[in-house]
């Protein structure tokens, strides 16, 4: 049985899935980090793959950019395919001075401007948080792999471009590490459906300084992030 946007058979998707925004990043993981990987989804070119990592079945599915797109795939993966652990692997823009390009962030919680959350909670504010078990295991995995991580809160926005140069000042003052586009709705839906979710992010640019990673830097740091996520399978 397939869903509206995923054409996989019911048994083709693993209980643990990685969720990059970019479908080509999903293909990179399948081609370079999984064994016996096969493509289960090409609908709208939002590629999804399942393969084997250290003897365990694991899937990786592109979600597109923004909480509207991501929520469609998160909903269908949980309700149609019974996915139990969802791990976002994406990028973010840093807003704290101590963060560097290529740093890996384990997101403990996600503030944001999701219109969906405003509707779900009738204008009240829901604290969208990661699953502690996944968060702790990811931290332990990073220690084993000698990958340094930063732990803290992020902000998920649906507006990538904005003309206000002081837009993120209040969030910086309150300790938000970085800005991205999907974690808030991931954590909210995971809680709603009683499954586990985590967001692992790589700093691809620094909003305050204007620095941005080169292709080579991004490739190495993305691999570090993926290694941590795959250990959770």
Image (cartoon, rainbow, N blue to C red):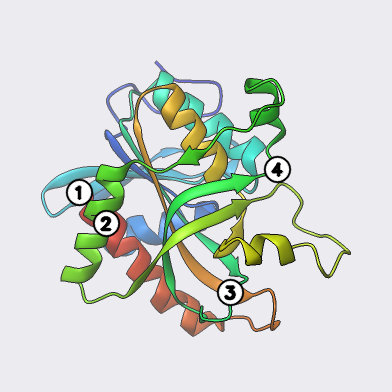
Q: Position of residue 177 (x, y in %)?
A: 54, 65
Of 189 and 26, the residue lying toward us: 189
Residue, disc 2? 138
Q: Position of residue 144 (x, y in %)?
A: 16, 69
Q: Residue 211: give its label.
A: none
Of 82 and 191, the residue lying toward us: 191
Mark 1 nearby-residue class (10 Å; few <14, some 14–19, many ≥20): some
Q: Mark 4 or 3, which is nearer the eye?
A: 3
Is residue 35 in view from this perspective? no
Q: Please state if 72 lies on the left or on the right of 12 as rendered.
A: right
Residue, disc 3? 96
Q: Residue 113: give its label.
A: 4
Is residue 131 in view from this perspective? yes
The quadrant the N terminus occupies is top left
Quarter of the image for residue 22 reads bottom right
For the residues labelled 3 and 2, say whether their Cβ atoms are less than 8 Å apart. Answer: no
Going from N to C along the chain, the mark reached first, 1 or 3, is 1
Seen at 48% across and 52% down, the residue is 20
Q: Secondary structure at mark 3?
A: loop
Seen at 10% across and 49% down, the residue is 55
For the residues labelled 2 and 1, say whether their Cβ atoms are less than 8 Å apart. Answer: no
Alpha carbon of mark 2 to alpha carbon of mark 1: how far? Answer: 19 Å
Q: Position of residue 21 (x, y in %)?
A: 54, 51
Q: Secondary structure at mark 2?
A: helix
Residue, disc 1? 52
Alpha carbon of mark 3 to alpha carbon of mark 2: how far? Answer: 22 Å
Q: Residue furthest top?
A: 1
Alpha carbon of mark 1 to alpha carbon of mark 4: how far? Answer: 36 Å
Q: Please state if 164 lies on the left or on the right of 40 as rendered.
A: right
């Amino acid at each position: 049985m397939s869903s509206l946007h995923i054409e996989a058979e019911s048994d083709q998707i693993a209980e643990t899935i990685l969720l990059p925004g970019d479908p080509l990043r999903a293909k990179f993981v399948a081609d370079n980090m999984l064994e016996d990987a096969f493509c289960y989804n090409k609908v709208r070119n939002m590629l999804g793959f399942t393969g084997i990592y250290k003897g365990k079945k694991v899937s990786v599915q592109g979600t597109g950019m923004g909480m509207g797109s991501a929520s469609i795939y998160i909903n269908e993966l949980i309700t149609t395919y019974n996915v139990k652990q969802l791990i976002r692997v994406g990028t973010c823009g840093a807003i704290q001075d101590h963060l560097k390009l290529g740093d890996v962030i384990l997101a403990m919680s996600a503030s944001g401007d999701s219109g969906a959350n405003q509707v779900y909670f009738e204008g009240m504010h829901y604290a969208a948080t990661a699953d502690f078990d996944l968060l702790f295991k990811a931290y332990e995995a990073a220690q084993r792999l000698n990958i340094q991580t930063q732990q803290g809160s992020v902000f998920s926005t649906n507006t990538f471009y904005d003309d206000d140069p002081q837009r993120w000042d209040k969030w910086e003052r309150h300790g938000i590490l970085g800005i991205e586009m999907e974690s808030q709705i991931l954590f909210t839906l995971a809680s709603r459906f009683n499954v586990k979710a985590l967001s692992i992010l790589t700093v691809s640019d620094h909003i305050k300084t204007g620095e941005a990673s080169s292709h080579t830097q991004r490739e190495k740091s993305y691999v570090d992030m993926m290694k941590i996520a795959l250990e959770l399978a």
